[in-house]
């Protein structure tokens, strides 16, 4: 194996470690949110993303990006959340083709219940993951990555 092959393998191993950490955390979040709030991780992500917007609404394509879903999957998810009374759609006054998605009062209440569940499960998952030797170095690097990301955001 040459130097270039070694570099590719190092990157591939890093990717596999990152994917393992992501899956570990997501599984813990999924279990807790489902059991205690009746939400999936992606449903929580959508409610959380909407709550962080000025005016508490987003266009569907923004919501798709925020939830890392395809446009069609986002539409299906919004349909389900709307049927549960957690979201509503509002026509965009500036663009007749545009549709906003907004949290309802019920969506806000459920998010208020789910947020501490999410935060506690995330903290517990991070602590547990830190005890796994393959994942610990990545977790140790997270504070530096957060600082680097914050610096990059300040420059843009």
Image: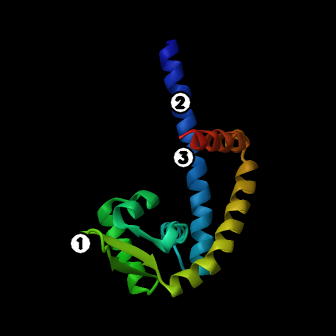
Q: Nearer the viewer, mark 1 or mark 3?
A: 1
For this rendering, which residue is in front, 2 or 48? 48
Q: Quadrant of residue 101?
A: bottom left
Residue at x 57% of width, y 48% of height: 20
Tell me if residue 41 comes above or below residue 7 in the rendering: below
Count numbered badges in the picture. 3
Mark closest to the chain's N terminus, 1 or 3 = 3
Label 2 sits on residue: 11
Mark 2 to mark 1 CA distance (whole Å): 46 Å
Do residues under tags 2 and 1 come within 8 Å of each other at their CB atoms? Answer: no
Q: Is residue 103 left or right of residue 70?
A: right
The percent position of residue 136, horizontal first and vertical second, equals 72, 43
Q: Is residue 148 left or right of residue 90?
A: right
Mark closest to the chain's N terminus, 2 or 1 = 2
Label 3 sits on residue: 19
The percent position of residue 11, horizontal first and vertical second, equals 53, 30
Label 1 sits on residue: 96
Tell me if residue 140 comes above or below residue 116 in the rendering: above
- Helix or strand or loop: what does disc 1 sit on? loop
Mark 2 to mark 3 CA distance (whole Å): 12 Å
Tell me if residue 154 comes above or below residue 86 in the rendering: above
For this rendering, which residue is in front, 44 or 48? 48
The percent position of residue 55, horizontal first and vertical second, equals 49, 73
For this rendering, which residue is in front, 26 or 143? 143
For this rendering, which residue is in front, 126 or 90? 90
Q: Quadrant of residue 26?
A: bottom right
Residue at x 43% of width, y 86% of height: 84
Mark 1 to mark 3 CA distance (whole Å): 40 Å
Which residue appears farthest toward the front when viewing the image? 94
Q: Is residue 40 left or right of residue 113?
A: left
């Amino acid at each position: 194996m040459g130097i270039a092959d070694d570099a590719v393998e190092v990157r591939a191993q890093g990717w596999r470690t990152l994917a393992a950490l992501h899956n570990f955390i997501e599984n813990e979040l999924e279990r807790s949110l489902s059991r205690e709030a009746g939400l999936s991780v992606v449903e929580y992500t959508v409610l959380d993303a909407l709550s962080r917007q000025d005016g508490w609404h987003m266009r569907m394509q923004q919501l798709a990006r925020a939830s890392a879903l395809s446009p069609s999957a986002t539409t299906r998810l919004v349909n389900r959340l709307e049927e549960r009374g957690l979201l509503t759609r509002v026509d965009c006054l500036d663009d007749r083709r545009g549709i906003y998605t907004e949290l309802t009062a019920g969506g806000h209440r459920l998010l208020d219940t789910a947020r501490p569940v999410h935060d506690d499960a995330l903290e517990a998952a991070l602590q547990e993951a830190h005890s796994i030797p393959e994942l610990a170095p990545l977790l140790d690097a997270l504070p530096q990555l957060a600082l680097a990301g914050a610096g990059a955001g300040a420059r843009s």
